[in-house]
Image (cartoon, rainbow, N blue to C red):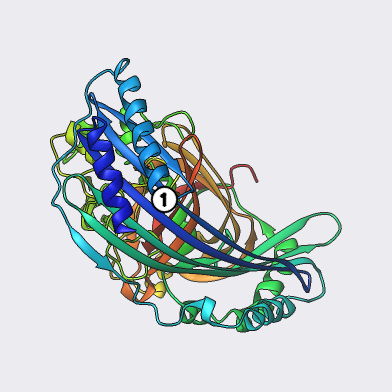
Amino acid sequence: MKKHIERALQKAKVAGATYVDARILKTQDERIATKNGVLDNLSSNESKGFGIRVIADGAWGFSSSSVINDSEIDKVAQEAVAIAKASAKVKHEPVKLSPVEAYVDDVKSPVKDDPKDIPISDRVKFALDCDKTMNKDGIVSRSTRLFNRHEDKWFGSSEGSMIYQEDVKVGAGYTAIASNGKEVAQRSYPASFGGVYSRDGWNYIEKYKLMENGGRIADEAVQILSAKPCPQGKKDIVIEGSQLALQLHESIGHPVELDRVFGTEAAFAGKSFVKPEMMKDFRYGSDIVNITADATIPHAFGGFAYDDDGVKAQRVFIIKDGIFQRFLDSREDAAKLNMASMGANRASSWSRIPIVRMVSVNLEPGNSTFDDLIKDVEDGIYLSTVLTWSIDDMRLNFQFTTELGWEIKNGKLGEMVKRPTYTGISYDFWRSCDAIGNKDLWDVWGVPNCGKGEPMQLMHVSHGVSPARFRQIQVGVGS
């Protein structure tokens, strides 16, 4: 594969490129799904191909193919350069890249218990057994999902990098849906979007004790149907980890993507209220809010060793002590601010050009226990598990609904609340944060379906968070 990369670099340079990088990506996915006690999906998919990205006459060009041989590499390299030269005729300004160190590296996955090494029959049985635990009165639909991926990526650049990365990824979760004939209620575990995801092995799935929690999840789905509606007004709220991960994703992660700020990624997912002049000055959150972008966290679903610019993974502060510090960026976008890239340029496939994507964007832990978060609330709500959400194109005004919640009265959890809703303005919301859970409560939640780009690229990202408390947030909107 490295010889193929070397050939791609050489052929593109001969054709007139001043910069070249080439990626070969091979992925093998397996998916298992059950529904109402029967196997609903059992699939295995392999994808393999390469992409060549070049700069010629000051403009980008990109081409790709699923056929990996010498003649196809020569053809695609010439196509990429021809596209760049055609694009150069209408460019606004020449492409510039921030400097990067050249790396020669082989990065193997540390995972020793790859799910694909477990007999498929055993994994199907596990999914069906999980499904069975939710089979209770009042449940009208139940589903289980298992996912695993093995990924091999080779990257080389005309600046001297030659990198191989291997990844093993897993995911698992289930959902129970209850109905009383008039309405339905959903309960998911361990999280929405099919569950939890990580760059890890089967032990990660076992950590969440799916078999032991199915009955409780089914019971909660039924209980939601008769739960009291969410009250309306301003309340103190405590947000559970998987829900807070999405809050972080939408109201901080997306707004600080630098391509979105410059308007080069606006059509699908909108722009951003955050501007370069806000760096080091804008109060994004309270003094205790510290947000890092950290692709080095072991097993984080949004982690890696090197991004698709060849930038080595690193940990940087996006927000420190509540003050906005820097953006998620690519080498191209970082150069516009005369900065070195922090390494967030990634493509979802060999057939897609890299764009700025979240890595593992995290709310650093505080020092509160769960009891601490609750005990200082006289009248509030504890919210759990994403159900629906909406946020405007500038990433300012948002509304979230969770699957369920519980009242907090005089520092103690009380009655269940049906589908509580809360709303706010992104920076006002984070400024209201006055307590964050400690390291014992901190977990990294994988997101398997972050959508961005045209054509669409679904990316694996993640967010490390603990539950946290927010004061006087509007709840009950849309109830």
Residue shown at 60% from the left, 83% from the top: 119
Residue 285 visible in the snapshot: no
Residue 335 visible in the snapshot: yes
Place of residue 261 in the rendered image (x, y in percent of width and height, measured from the top left) = 32, 32
Residue shown at 51% from the left, 64% from the top: 28
Q: Is residue 124 left or right of residue 373?
A: right
Residue shown at 23% from the left, 35% from the top: 14
| Farthest residue, direction top | 89
Place of residue 64 in the rendered image (x, y in percent of width and height, measured from the top left) = 43, 41
Q: Name the residue nearer the viewer: 454 or 472.
A: 454
Q: Is residue 112 left or right of residue 98?
A: right
Q: Toward which corner of the image does residue 52 lie, by quadrant?
A: top left
Residue shown at 32% from the left, 35% from the top: 259
Q: Is residue 152 left or right of residue 407?
A: left
Viewport quadrant of the N terminus: bottom left
Q: Name the residue nearer the viewer: 197 or 406.
A: 197
Place of residue 460 in the rendered image (x, y in percent of width and height, measured from the top left) = 44, 56
Q: Which element carries disc 1, helix, strand or loop?
A: loop
* Above-or-below relation of 369 to 184: below
* Above-or-below relation of 170 to 4: below
The number of callouts visible is 1
Q: Name the residue nearer the viewer: 399 or 475.
A: 399
Q: Name the residue nearer the viewer: 286 or 23.
A: 23
Place of residue 11 in the rendered image (x, y in percent of width and height, measured from the top left) = 28, 39
Q: Mark 1 — residue? A: 69
Q: Residues within 10 Å of mark 1 (few under 14, many from 20)?
A: few
Disc 1 residue type (three-letter)? Asn
Q: Is residue 467 left or right of residue 30?
A: left
